[in-house]
Image: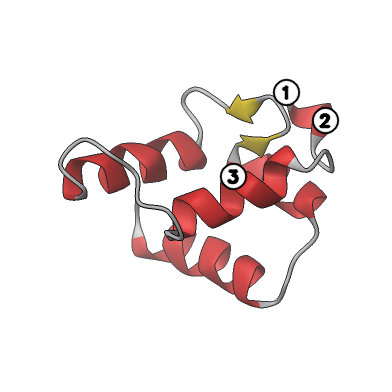
Amino acid sequence: MDPVSRAAVGAAVARGSTPGSLGPAGFTSGGIKAGSTAAKMMSASAVAGRGGVGSGSLVSVCQSKGASGGSKRNK
């Protein structure tokens, strides 16, 4: 993921963003949307984590917030 996207998603999480604001990045109530920024983040995280996405990582925190139901329109 490019540095600008990473910073934008990180800033949204740091601000305590609502789950709905994570939907456009691909963190939806139905899971991570294929081909999205979230999918690219998850892929990079899995490669860095040798096959797994770590608990408490940026990806897992964003997905947890997205899964809480605020981003249903982006499924």
Q: Residues within 10 Å of mark 2 (few under 14, many from 20)?
A: some
Query: Vertically, is 16 above or below 66?
Result: below
Observer-side mark, 3 or 2, equals 3
Q: Quadrant of residue 39?
A: top left
Q: Is residue 53 left or right of residue 25?
A: left
Mark 3: secondary structure: helix
Tag 2: amino acid: Lys
Whole-angstrom CA distance, mark 1 to mark 3, is 13 Å
Tag 3–tag 2 contact (CB < 8 Å): no
Image location of residue 13, percent across then percent down: 62, 67
Q: Which one is in front, 12 or 2?
A: 12
Tag 1: amino acid: Lys
Of the numbered discs in the image, which one, if any, rests on residue 72? 2
Q: Residue at x 50, y 50 (%)?
A: 60
Tag 1–tag 2 contact (CB < 8 Å): yes
Mark 1: secondary structure: loop
Query: Vertically, is 68 above or below 32?
Result: below
Q: Which one is in front, 69 or 74?
A: 69
Query: Vertically, is 29 above or below 23?
Result: above
Tag 3: amino acid: Gln
The residue tagged 3 is 63
Q: Residue at x 69, y 51 (%)?
A: 65
Tag 1–tag 3 contact (CB < 8 Å): no
Query: Vertically, is 41 above or below 75?
Result: below
Q: Residue at x 71, y 39 (%)?
A: 67
The residue tagged 1 is 75
Q: Closer to the N terminus: mark 1 or mark 3?
A: 3
Mark 2: secondary structure: helix
Image location of residue 75, percent across then percent down: 73, 23
Whole-angstrom CA distance, mark 3 to mark 2, is 13 Å
Q: Closer to the N terminus: mark 3 or mark 2?
A: 3
